[in-house]
Amino acid sequence: MNRISSIRKDWKLIETLIDENRSILDIGCGDGMLMEQLEKNLNATTHGIELDRDLASKAIAKGFNVIHGDAELDLSQYSNNSFDYVILSQTLQAMMKPKEILSELLRIGSKAIVSFPNFGHWKIRFQLLVSGRMPVTESLPYTWYDTPNIHFFTIKDFLKLCSDMNIIVEKSIGLTSRGKQFDISESFAGVNFFTHEAIFLLSYKNFEPIKIKSTKEIFNKNSVIVS
């Protein structure tokens, strides 16, 4: 599965996680190709933010609502629950502070879709074991000294972070290096070993307020409730 077909597969799976007629923010939107796909197939209302000025300019020239900006700095400009979905595709490992970024995604959007290459895949483990050097694979195609990826993590690492942050994994999709798709949550124990790339649909759990019913309609002003 070469890099281009991998990204295309990633985008197609992202589309399956999104309902029609929704508002979407695509972080690291490039020249707007995923936005175009979602507008065409899901009638979505899309916005994008892109660090590369040339790519942002190309997206704007195509008529997309895109701003040139740095997600690490500029997401704070978006208000709470601005979008139904926020997408971060194949980029989390390149963020300086991935934990803070995840928090921002779920502040801005009701749901977040995050995809990333799995550093626990067997090919990466094998290359590191045999060569003793940082692996170069289809999903991580850069040498260690010129890679934009600064945080290498596995599916287990990501799930642990979600648990620590009280993030709910609504759906998780894994891809093998040959492009076979499977549900991570329903797979066998060795899923971290065989998953080449992963896609997660995330949200925060909404807690219902606890209502205390009283047999008395009126408390006098000196009454207290002791828990």
Image: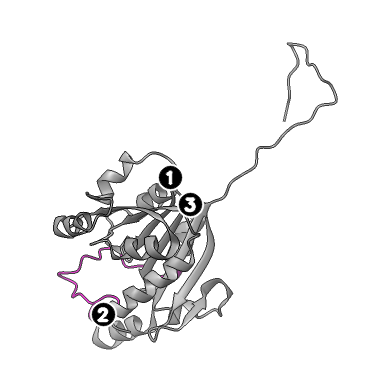
User: Mark 2 and 3 residues: CB-CB less than 8 Å, in contact?
Assistant: no
Taking the spot 38% from the left edge, 47% from the top edge, the residue there is 104
Residues shaded magenta: 133-156
Q: Is residue 150 left or right of residue 205?
A: left
Per the image, the residue denoted by label 2 is 135
Answer yes or no: is residue 138 visible. Answer: no
Q: Residues within 10 Å of mark 1 (few under 14, many from 20)?
A: many
Per the image, the residue denoted by label 3 is 165
- Upstream in sequence: badge 1 or badge 2: 1
Q: Quadrant of residue 222?
A: top right
x and y percent of residue 218 in the render?
Answer: 80, 16
Q: Is residue 196 left or right of residue 135?
A: right
Q: CA distance from mark 1 to mark 2?
A: 34 Å
Quarter occupied by the C terminus? top right
Answer yes or no: is residue 130 visible. Answer: yes
Q: Which mark is residue 10?
A: none
Taking the spot 19% from the left edge, 72% from the top edge, the residue there is 144
Per the image, the residue denoted by label 1 is 107
Assign a secondary structure to mark 1.
helix
x and y percent of residue 152 in the render?
Answer: 32, 67
- Upstream in sequence: badge 2 or badge 3: 2
x and y percent of residue 141 in the render?
Answer: 23, 77
